[in-house]
Image: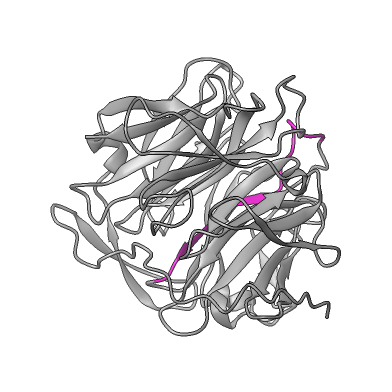
Amino acid sequence: MKRIAIATIAVLAVAGCVGRSNLVPGGSMSSAVTPAGRPIREDNTSLLKLLKKQVVIGSTIDPKFGQLNPYGLTVATSTAGDFTQGDLAVCNFNAKKNVQGTGFTVVALHPKPGSKPLLVSSSKTLLGCSALALSPSDDIWASAFAANDVPIISSSGKEEGNIKGKPFDHPWGQTFAAPTSGSPVFYVSDAGNGTIIRINLGTTFTYDVIAKGFAVNHGKPGSIFAPSGLTYDPSVDTLYIVDGTNNTVVAFDNVTSIMSGGIIVEKGGMTFKGPSAGDAKLVSSGSPLDGPISAALLPNGNLVIGNTGNASGSNIMVEMTPSGTILDTRNVDTGASGSLFGIVATGTDDSNTKIYFNDDNDNNLQVLEK
C-alpha cells in the first residue's frame, strides 16, 4: 500500500467536533437503530421549519484572482493561521472566466453578514476543488477533482503535502472524522471509480478502500455525480454518503471498523454485499432527493441534504432523520437549479443551530438562522 512521508504532519488530536446530544430541548424523540442494530434516538422536530431567516454572509469570490463557483465548505473548530474559530472556509471550483473545474482558491469568511473573503490559498494543487475538511488545527485538506489529488495546506496557506496516485481517482467528497474511541481519520470519495477511502493519519499515511461500487456518471466538471456529501456522526460512528446518480443517502455504521474491501455497493445503490455489508444501510431514496451532492449533520443528529437536479429552477434542501424520515424541504434559491453546493451546520442544540451554504448562482455564502 502506498505511503507518503510528511514530517510536518503528526497524528491529529481528537477534534472538538460538535457531537449530538441524545436529549434535545423541545425535540420530539423516537427510537431507531443503526444498521448494526445499535439503538439511537431521533429528533423529529424540523430545524428547517424553525430557521425562518435566510441571510447573506458575504461574497465567496476571492479578492486576488476573482475565482468563483464555490463548492467546498467547512467550519474552523479552532483559531489558527488565517482562521478564527467559527470561520467558514470555502473553495472555488471555477477560475475567473467561469470555466468549470479551473478554480484553485480557498477563502475564509467570518460568520456574520457583511463579511469579506480572505484569500487563504491559491495552490494549483487545488485545481477543481470540490470539497474541504479542516483538521482540529485548521490544516486544510481538499478534494481537488481536476488536479486529481488531495492537497494538505496549513491554516496560513502554506502547502504541507499532496496525496496523489492510487487509490485516489478524481477525489470528489471529503470529511474529517474523530471517533469517540480510536484515531482520527479523513474519508475521501472518488468521482472516477465510486470508492470511499479512509486516510489513516500519522507521519506516514496509509489508505483503506472501505467501499466501492457507488454510481458515477463520468460527467464533465459541472455535470458530475458521484458519492459525495460525506458526513460523519461521532456519537454513533456513522458515515453518511450522498449518491446523486441514484438519488440516495447511505449510512455506514461502525465505519471505523470497516476495513479495505468491506462494502460493495450493488447496482442501483440500494443493496450491499461484502464482509461489512451488515454495516451498510439505505437511509433514503427517490423524491424529494433530486441530484443531491452536499450534506451536513445537524447538532441533533438529523441530516440536511442539498439537491442540484431540480429542473424547474429551484434549489431544494431536504431535512431527514437518520432513519430517513423526511421532515421538511426548503427552496433556498429560485434561480437556475444546480446552485446548492457545500453545506455545514453549527450549534449545540435546536435552539442555536445555523445552516450555512454556498449559493453558486450568487457566488456567496448564506445562512439559515432563527
The furthest residue to the left: 26
- Does residue 251 appear in this view? no
Q: Is residue 145 above or below residue 168?
A: above
Q: Tell whether position 230 is magenta.
A: yes
Quarter containing the C terminus: top left
Left or right, residue 111 beside residue 70: left
Magenta region: 220-234
Residue 241 percent location from the top left of the image: 58, 56
Which of these two is toward me, 364 or 5?
A: 5
Quarter containing the N terminus: bottom right
Which of these two is toward me, 3 or 181?
A: 3
Residue 106 percent location from the top left of the image: 60, 41
Give the image quarter of residue 128: top right
Q: Tell whether position 329 is magenta.
A: no
The residue located at (51%, 21%) in the rendering is 314
Residue 299 percent location from the top left of the image: 31, 56
- Does residue 25 appear in this view? yes
Q: Is residue 202 above or below residue 73?
A: below
Numbered-mark total: 0
Residue 52 percent location from the top left of the image: 25, 29
Q: Is residue 255 above or below residue 268?
A: below
